[in-house]
Image (cartoon, rainbow, N blue to C red):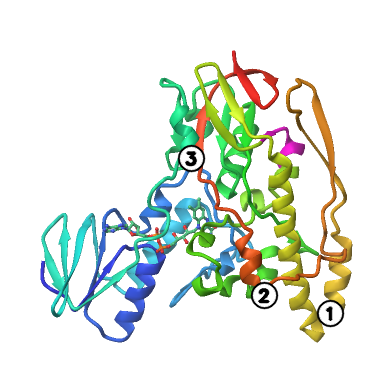
Amino acid sequence: MSEPGVVVIGAGQAGLSVSHELSAAGVEHVVLERGRVGETWRGRWDTFCLVTPNWTVRLPGGAYAGDDPDGFMPRDAIVAHLESYGRSFNAPVRERVTVTGLQPTADGFALSTSEADLRAKTVVVTTGAYQKAHRPAAAASLPSGLYAIDAEGYRNANAIPSGKVLVVGSGQTGCQIAEELFEAGRDVFLACGRAPWITRRLGGRDFVAWLFDTPFFDLTLSDLPSPQARLTANPQATGHGGGHDLHYRALQRLGVNLLGHFTGADSTRFRFADDLAESVSFGDARYAYICLLIRKSCESREWHRRICRRRAHSTRPRPTTLTWPDSGRSSSRRVSVRTTGPGSTPPTPSTTLASRLRTMGEAPSFLVSTFAVSTFCGNESRLS
Ligand SMILES: Cc1cc2nc3c(=O)[nH]c(=O)nc-3n(C[C@H](O)[C@H](O)[C@H](O)COP(=O)(O)OP(=O)(O)OC[C@H]3O[C@@H](n4cnc5c(N)ncnc54)[C@H](O)[C@@H]3O)c2cc1C
């Protein structure tokens, strides 16, 4: 392998964008990719599609130019877009080359790769943020022999053995997989954690478009109270079927059984924390915060003001009833949860952005497992 001035590691959207800009500036470089272009997207489940609308795809020199800007590209279209983007400027990608080591030298870096070692003056690491599945500690207690996979191992409902299914983790992935499995006729239990939510459309406009008008996407690491805060889940939502709401209330209406955090299992029982109400409250507080950001941005734009008030008023969510198994009893408890909608008065923030973010918990990661549940017994479920 010859020695280029610059090595870019990873041919996802970040690596390709860097390559595009280096090419435009006439800088000799190579992009090393352990799989194929867009490998991260290729590994997602069969019906995966974007949560962000197609118009948000704004790669330098490679913006979405199709006829469905408000749609949500499915997995294979995302990969095709990245491939065609790379081809459009002859990106010097070397596929199936894994970088296994990176050491600083006196005049740059020494790279060890699955093919050959090489040196470079500059290395750009664009290897992505979602490389390793994170299983919660409680997963270690799962009985051996139970079919248990991480979200990245999920392909479709047919590939999951028959029986009831527990999805652990309620970020976008967990909610989408729970919905898909339920629609495939499965009895689905969702162990919920802390995640923000937002309605897909506010006044007929997609929530991502609203957020683009706010500082939401402009937060930098230094705005966060700790590096851990970057792991906070994205708002629960989906792009499926043209995009629709996919938060706890929507899932419960559908028929998905909501539970608290998964805390462990033995050979016959699964245990869940009695904290579903707290997780719902957390999401509602974040919902109110996002609505506050949107409201503030509306108020700061004179031309937006009247439209915003009218739209927000018409989309005010109504109080919703959530049901979940009561602690220590097999009957169900109904709890009324009132949300602060964009049309009502949001809580006035008394803290800085950093301290608000400090209250956000770490997003859980996902484990999809199947098991059979017969009766609820407090916060535990018995295996049949
Ligand atoms: C379930 C899920 C849903 C998402 N939905 C959306 C969405 O709707 N909209 C959106 O904008 N974002 C979404 N994202 C986020 C999006 O996937 C990431 O922001 C995006 O992939 C980041 O691009 P990247 O180029 O930084 O990293 P990646 O796309 O992860 O690319 C990194 C590349 O580096 C390669 N690589 C890694 N290590 C090495 C190595 N040692 N040697 C060589 N190559 C290596 C990988 O194979 C990969 O191709 C989602 C993420 C997840 C997990």
Is residue 127 placed above or below 43 in the rendered structure? below
Q: Is residue 247 magenta?
A: no
Q: Within 10 angstroms of label 2, few (less than 14), some, or many (20 or more) residues?
A: some
Residue 374 occupies quadrant: top right
- Badge 2 is on which residue? 214
Vertical arrangement, residue 369 with respect to residue 314, above or below:
above
Quadrant containing ligand 1: bottom left
Callout in the foreground (1, 2) = 2
Q: Amino acid at mark 2?
A: Thr
Instruction: Decide if residue 113 is in sight here.
Output: yes
Please indicate, yes or no, whether residue 155 appears anywhere in the rendered image: no
Give the magenta-colored segment's residue range.
251-259
Three-letter amino acid code at disc 1? Arg
Q: What amino acid is at disc 3?
A: Pro
Q: Which residue is mark 3?
A: 136
Numbered label attached to residue 305: 1
Q: Nearer the viewer, residue 228 or 90?
A: 228
Q: Could you tell me which secondary element the residue under label 1 belongs to?
A: helix
Regarding mark 2 in the picture, which secondary structure is present there? loop
First-in-chain label (2 vs 3): 3
Q: In the rendered structure, are the residues bearing label 1 and label 3 in contact, judged by CB atoms less than 8 Å apart?
A: no
